[in-house]
């Protein structure tokens, strides 16, 4: 098995070296070999290399520096626009103006995104997913000129690493893998699963920095607060309505 999977790191700082267009095309072509529902390929990839366009996108991603620092920014979109137009041009009436169709297209987009990332990392490039895409999907739609039936679901910055960041931790396999049926977690299992993560120096630093008692509180009260989740959920639902996925 390719060792890239076990040594991979999220790269947020990139060198000034550009990505050769032929290499990028090769990586994107590899991505399109990803699994897709019914072989419909209901996704689109917006490639941003222009500096001004990166600057316009940056505020939608909370001005994270990798947006303007990366040579390439890829926005992966759920896209039933193209497929629906094809259907109508072939005397077939599409019925994809619903939430299930958005989920279908979003899954397609995420599958191709991860395949693109795997291909890029095999070539020595670094990548970083931006979770801010769904937070400000409305702004990204305006900037990229996305028509109805198209919704951005994730963004990836890509470039040659400027350094080798520390590899982040992962939970043990038993935390996420279940045999045959789902085995619900006892308090003892939760303690065992999260013990190493909670005892890491970086975790203890997060707790102290945010003046909290536990790492879980950092997540629920600082990083991913209920109020924020509810606010951005409302925004995303409005986007889905506007783009034709919710009646």
Image: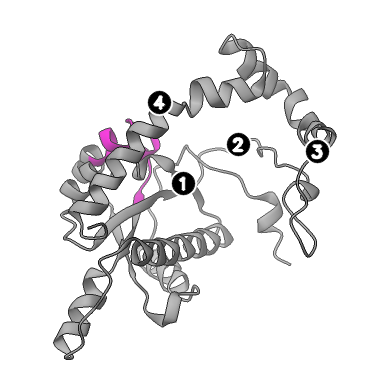
Residue at which label 1 appears: 129
**Mark 3–mark 1 distance (CA, rounded to whole Å):** 32 Å
Q: Is residue 83 left or right of residue 164?
A: left
Please identify, in this view, whether the residue under mark 2 or under mark 4 is nearer the observer.
Answer: 4
Q: Earlier in the sequence, mark 2 or mark 4?
A: 2
Could you tell me residue 169's position as x and y percent?
A: 69, 38
Question: Residue extending furthest bottom?
Answer: 91
As measured in the structure, the alpha-carbon distance from the residue carrying label 2 to the one carrying label 4 is 32 Å
Q: Residue at x 61, y 12 (%)?
A: 212
- Does 59 lie within the magenta span? yes
Could you classify mark 4 by the number of other residues whose Cα lies within 10 Å: few (under 14), some (14-19), or many (20 or more)? Answer: few
Mark 3 vs mark 2, CA separation in Å: 35 Å
Of residues 165 and 191, the one drawn nearer to the viewer in this rendering = 191
Q: Is residue 198 magenta?
A: no
Which mark is first along the chain, 1 or 3? Answer: 1
* Relative to 61, residue 72 above or below: below
Tag shown at residue 143: none
Which residue is labeled 4 in the image?
227
């Amino acid at each position: 098995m390719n060792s890239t999977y076990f040594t991979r790191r999220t790269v947020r700082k990139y060198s000034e070296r550009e990505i050769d267009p032929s290499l990028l095309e090769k990586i994107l072509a590899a991505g399109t070999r990803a699994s897709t529902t019914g072989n419909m390929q209901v996704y689109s990839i917006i490639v941003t290399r222009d500096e001004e366009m990166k600057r316009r996108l940056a505020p939608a991603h909370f001005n994270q520096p990798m947006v303007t620092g990366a040579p390439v920014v890829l926005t992966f979109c759920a896209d039933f626009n193209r497929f629906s137009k094809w259907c109508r041009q072939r005397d077939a009436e599409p019925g994809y103006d619903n939430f299930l169709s958005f989920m279908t297209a979003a899954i397609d987009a995420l599958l191709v995104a991860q395949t693109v990332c795997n291909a890029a990392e095999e070539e020595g490039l670094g990548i970083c997913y931006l979770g801010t895409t769904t937070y400000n999907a409305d702004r990204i739609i305006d900037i990229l000129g996305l028509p109805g039936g198209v919704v951005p679901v994730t963004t990836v910055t890509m470039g040659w690493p400027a350094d080798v960041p520390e590899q982040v931790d992962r939970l043990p396999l038993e935390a996420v893998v279940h045999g045959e049926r789902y085995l619900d977690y006892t308090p003892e299992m939760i303690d065992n699963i999260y013990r190493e993560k909670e005892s890491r120096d970086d975790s203890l630093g997060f707790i102290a920095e945010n003046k909290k008692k536990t790492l879980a509180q950092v997540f629920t009260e600082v990083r991913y607060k209920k109020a924020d989740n509810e606010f951005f959920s409302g925004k995303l639902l409005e986007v889905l309505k506007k783009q034709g996925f919710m009646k």
